[in-house]
Amino acid sequence: MMNKTILAAASIAALVVGGVAVAGPGKFSRADKDGDGKISVQEIDARNKEFIAKADADKDGFVTEEEMEALRAARKAEMKARMFPDTNKDGYVDRREHEDAARARFADLDKDGDGRLSEQEMRDGHSRGHGRGHGRGRP
């Protein structure tokens, strides 16, 4: 059972990383941690460790099917909240909720805190999935 769990976790992580590596320039650059234009085994191992750490809710070093489903559900909820920021849960997004969400997104993108977004900050935010309904820092 334990070997199956390790194999399943490694397979899932490899698929996730593999999808990142071939999916496009933004996702490739996210996996290329040292920015040398290549993805090394060490960078993939680091991505796998990040993925396992994020998915491993009980911190036992393994990812079960239940933990994977919980991670999927959490990402889906985060995406819904980003797409429909109804913070007061009245079934509508009013102007304040929309503007608050836009301000939060801007602040998240503005990594140097200068109150302006550079092309690089926009690219970096876009490659992390911001603005496309994806969760933050996806593996």
Image (spheres, rainbow, N blue to C red):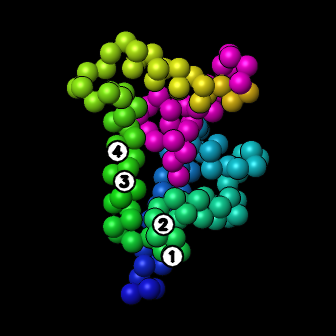
CB within 8 Å, label 4 to label 2:
no
Q: Which residue was labeled with disc 3?
A: 72
Of labels 1 and 3, the one closer to you:
1
How many marks the image carries: the answer is 4
- Of residues 9 and 15, the one drawn nearer to the viewer in this rendering: 9
Q: CA distance from mark 4 to mark 3?
A: 6 Å
Q: Which residue was labeled with disc 4?
A: 76
**In magenta stretch: residue 138:** yes
Q: Earlier in the sequence, mark 2 or mark 3?
A: 2
Local crowd at mark 1 within 10 Å, few (<14), some, or many (≥20)?
few
Q: Secondary structure at mark 2?
A: loop
Residue 56 is situated, as x and y percent measured from the top left of the image, at 48, 66
Q: Secondary structure at mark 4?
A: helix
Q: Majority secondary structure of the magenta segment?
A: loop
Residue type beneath disc 1: Asp
Q: CA distance from mark 1 to mark 2?
A: 7 Å
Q: Which residue was labeled with disc 1?
A: 60
Q: Quadrant of the N terminus?
A: bottom left
Residue type beneath disc 4: Lys
Q: Earlier in the sequence, mark 4 or mark 1?
A: 1
Local crowd at mark 2 within 10 Å, few (<14), some, or many (≥20)?
many
Residue 72 is situated, as x and y percent measured from the top left of the image, at 36, 53
**Which stretch did the figure color magenta?**
113-139
Residue at x 55%, y 31% (from the top left corner)? 126
Residue 44 located left or right of residue 88: right
Q: Is residue 122 above or below residue 12?
A: above
Q: Secondary structure at mark 1?
A: loop
Q: Which residue was labeled with disc 2?
A: 56
Tag shown at residue 103: none
